[in-house]
């Protein structure tokens, strides 16, 4: 089975400051990688995904993540956060074969005015 | 475009009662999933259905049953609810079955309390 580790359960950051949310996974096979965001009382929404090609992927709202195969990481970054970025963020992994997705335990990002 | 629809949104049960959580997707996806979300534990897979007519156990299947009624619908049943099943339940779907994996689409969740 895969495992996904999000080391930081809570990350407070001031508005307009940069942020990095860390995600590491364990896998001996090729994987697909995802970041999801969950706002209060809502389901998970896809933020960005790595399927193949460029190891740096970007979302429409300024987040980016870089796939690092040697370090088995997929950290999420944003150079300048907004109040509206306050949410729970989940990293997920799926093997290239099979049907299951594996989720980390989530990181709660709180942006402080 | 509704995406993934879950009903009900909220439910309170007494220990020992049974109920079925409903999920329907209108994206013609083959794969559907049921997760539970608990504080500090992220999402844990209960059951999934790779395609119509098939179901498989996930990480935490005990106390639950599922039915893939057709391609659109995937229900989760609690036969005898226990307080440990108090949680937020999410249904998700994804496509394709093989080839480049696409992300999952989630419903808004069912918040279930067992007293």
Image (cartoon, grey):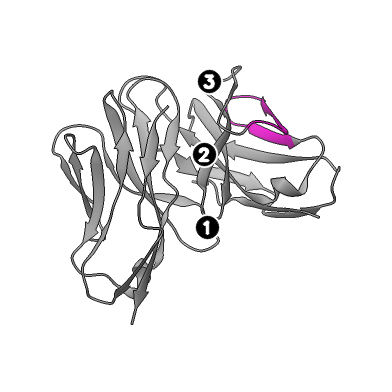
**What is the C-alpha distance between the residues marked 1 and 3?**
26 Å
Q: Few, some or many C-alpha atoms within 10 Å of disc 1 (few <14, some 14-19, many ≥20)?
A: some
Identify the image quadrant of residue B75.
top right
Depth order, front residue of B24/A96: A96
Residue positioned most to the bottom: A113
- Earlier along the polypeptide chain: callout 3 or callout 2? 3
Q: Which residues are magenta?
A: B61-77
**What is the C-alpha distance between the residues marked 3 and 2?**
13 Å
Q: Position of residue A81 (x, y in %)?
A: 26, 70
In the figure, is residue B102 to the left or right of B25? left
In the figure, is residue A67 to the left or right of A45? left
Depth order, front residue of B28/A112: A112
In the figure, is residue B111 to the left or right of A33? right
The relative height of residue A67 versus residue B115 in the rendered view (above or below) is: above
Residue positioned most to the top: B53
Q: Few, some or many C-alpha atoms within 10 Å of disc 3 (few <14, some 14-19, many ≥20)?
A: some
The relative height of residue B111 versus residue B65 in the rendered view (above or below) is: below
**Residue B92, which numbered label?**
2
Residue at numbered disc 3: B51
Q: Position of residue A28 (x, y in %)?
A: 28, 24
In the figure, is residue B89 to the left or right of B1? right
Q: Position of residue A12 (x, y in %)?
A: 35, 71
């Amino acid at each position: 089975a895969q495992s996904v580790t999000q080391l930081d359960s809570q990350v407070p950051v001031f508005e307009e400051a940069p942020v990095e949310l860390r995600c590491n996974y364990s896998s001996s096979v090729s994987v697909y990688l995802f970041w999801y965001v969950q706002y209060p009382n809502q389901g998970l929404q896809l933020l960005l995904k790595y399927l193949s090609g460029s190891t740096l992927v970007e979302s429409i709202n300024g987040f980016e993540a870089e796939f690092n195969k040697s370090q088995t990481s997929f950290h999420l970054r944003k150079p300048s956060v907004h109040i509206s970025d306050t949410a729970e963020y989940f990293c997920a992994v799926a093997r290239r074969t099979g049907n299951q997705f594996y989720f980390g335990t989530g990181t709660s990002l709180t942006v402080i005015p | 475009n509704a995406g993934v629809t879950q009903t009900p949104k909220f439910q309170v049960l007494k220990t020992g009662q049974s109920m079925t959580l409903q999920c329907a997707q209108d994206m013609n996806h083959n794969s559907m999933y049921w997760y539970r979300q608990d504080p500090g534990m992220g999402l844990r897979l209960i059951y999934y259905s790779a395609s119509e007519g098939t179901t498989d156990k996930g990480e935490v299947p005990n106390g639950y049953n599922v039915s893939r009624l057709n391609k659109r619908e995937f229900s989760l049943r609690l036969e005898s609810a226990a307080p440990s099943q108090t949680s937020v339940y999410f249904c998700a779907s994804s496509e394709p079955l093989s080839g480049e994996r696409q992300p999952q689409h989630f419903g808004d969740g069912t918040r279930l309390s067992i007293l």
